Amino acid sequence: MKVITVTFNPALDREFIIEDFQVNKLHRILHREDMQMSPGGKGINVSIALAKLRVQSVAIGVLGGYIGRVLLTELSKLSPLISTSFVHIDHETRENIAILDPKDHTITEINSPGPTVEKRTVDFLVKRYQMLLSRAEAVVLSGSLPPNLGGEIYGMLAKMAKEKGKQVFMEITDDYIRSAFDIQVPNVIKPDVRQKAVVLGKKLISLEDYVDTASELVSMGAEMAIISYQIKSDIVATSDGVWIISTPLEIEISNLLGAGDAYIAAMVYKRLTCPNCDHLEVAKFGYAAALAKTKKLPKEMPEYNEINECLNNCEIKRLR
């Protein structure tokens, strides 16, 4: 096992492909291939993407009820490279719905909040995490938290990992960043700005806003900060400067589901397999993975050769 992925708020994901999707209208799905059920939650998605890159991981977190059992069953079918160590509770794991419309180029997501998690459950999960750390090289902390938890838990897990010399990757919303950073700053931070372009409490509008904020995250202690910008670009900041990565290719918006998770997994892969690669190389490989993911409509993660083919379509420009 090389990587620990932590998913406090897993979900059983249901994706529906519906052309010309409209609200207040009955839609019938005629083909089974236009609907899919899969284990989800950002950390679990990263484990699935890592398996495509032949990297072993252990997915840990909290699962509950019938939905949790279905999720675990489906996850166990995907790859022998994914092992699990979830803490089980009685309350039901959430379900998320995504409606992909390739005709109108839209993606509509409905994400549930998930169950509350008692302190003893969190303590039990932390003990499992601590035991697994000795066998890991990297940790991925990503996704939403149950309603009663705050970003402090991410900071605590990051601190435990960094004290043991492990690489820590975070993809979390702004709701958790400051409280996590107050305890421990990760090696790599990729704020999740899908729902709202707000980082460190600031609304990001201009390119300069993105550049300044990515730089600020680095000044707070991150080795690298990456912020998605206008769908097809990313701002990458390190102590050496700030760059924008983009592509001349058109991006199909309805194919974006899971692209961020492919990005994180590919960066982890690159860091583990090329420890001497500079941060920009790591970010470029992550961007290429996200780009490769957008060539697939369902939540299917890319293979190494598909990522490699996309590297030639990545353009990097220094901004600062």
Image (tube, rainbow, N blue to C red):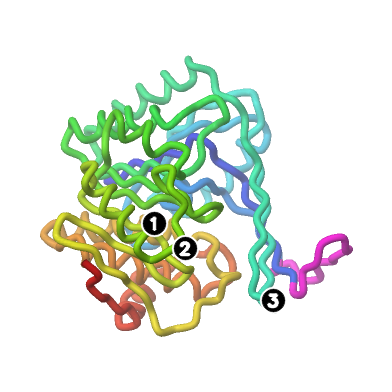
Which type of secondary structure does the marked residue at label 1 adopt?
Answer: helix
Which mark is drawn over residue 14? none
**What residue appears at the point 26 percent right and 76 percent down from the top-left corner?**
317
Q: Quadrant of residue 284?
A: bottom left
- Segment tinted magenta in the rendering: 19-34
Q: Residue 189 or 86: which is nearer the viewer?
A: 189
Residue assigned mark 1: 51
Query: Three-letter amino acid code at disc 3?
Result: Asp
First of labels 1, 2 by sequence position: 1
Which type of secondary structure does the marked residue at label 2 adopt?
Answer: helix
In the rendered image, residue 137, in percent from the top left (x then y), is placed at 22, 44
User: Does residue 146 appear to the left or right of 187 in the view shown?
Assistant: right
**What residue appears at the point 50 percent right and 60 percent down from the top-left corner?**
258
- Given the current orientation, which residue lies at the most extreme top position? 120
Residue assigned mark 2: 259
**What residue appears at the point 58 percent right and 48 percent down from the top-left corner?**
74
Q: CA distance from mark 1 to mark 2?
A: 15 Å
Q: Residues within 10 Å of mark 1 (few under 14, many from 20)?
A: many
Q: CA distance from mark 1 to mark 3?
A: 32 Å
